[in-house]
Amino acid sequence: MSFRAISKLHFIPPKQTVNTAYYIDEILAKSCLDTLRRTKNNGSVLEMKMVPNISKVVFMQDGAPAHTSKMTQGWCKENLPNYWEKSQWLGNSPDLNPIETYGDIFRKN
């Protein structure tokens, strides 16, 4: 999510384990890159460009094993501009993580 737009939600199939391979192939390579490559400046928040300048985006994740694996860290460094490695991540504060609020919206409805 960004101040301009949101990505489509990715639903994990029942009984699917989110391991490193699944995370890279299905979430990062498909959903994440497709979202970051949007070019529309108008329209639905699900279709609009996420940010005016992708080189100024900081991509960070939480500490889930699929996020912190060496393969994932390497893929992110190669494919995402301004990727923050695990050692650069901020503490686990819901005040610093806007996706927590985004998730609350769907749980309440």
Image (cartoon, rainbow, N blue to C red):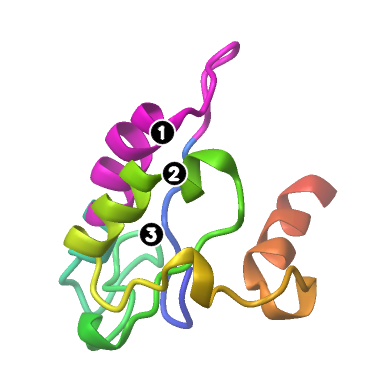
Residues marked 2 and 1 touching at CB (< 8 Å): yes
N-term mark: 3 or 1: 1
Q: Main secondary structure of the magenta part?
A: helix
3 vs 1, front mark: 1
Residue 57 x, y percent position in the rendering? 34, 81
- Is residue 9 shown to the viewer in this render? no
Q: Where 18 falls versus 54 (above or below)? A: above
Q: Residue at (60%, 58%) from the top-left corner?
A: 62
> Which residue in the rendered view is the most extreme toward the top?
15
Q: Residue at x 28, y 33 (%)?
A: 25
Q: Which residue is mark 2?
A: 69
Secondary element at image label 1: helix
Q: Residue at x 49, y 50 (%)?
A: 68
Which amino acid, mark 1?
Thr
Mark 2 or 1, closer to the camera? 2
**Most foreground residue, 9 or 72:** 72
Question: How many neighbours does mark 1 have within 10 angstroms: few (below 14), some (14-19), or many (20 or more)?
Answer: some
Mark 3 residue type: Leu
Taking depth in this image into account, of 15 and 52 the one nearest to the observer is 15
Element marked by disc 2: loop
The residue pinned by badge 3 equals 46
Q: Residues within 10 Å of mark 3 (few under 14, many from 20)?
A: some
Q: CA distance from mark 3 to mark 1?
A: 26 Å
Q: Which residues are magenta?
A: 11-33
Q: Quadrant of residue 42?
A: bottom left
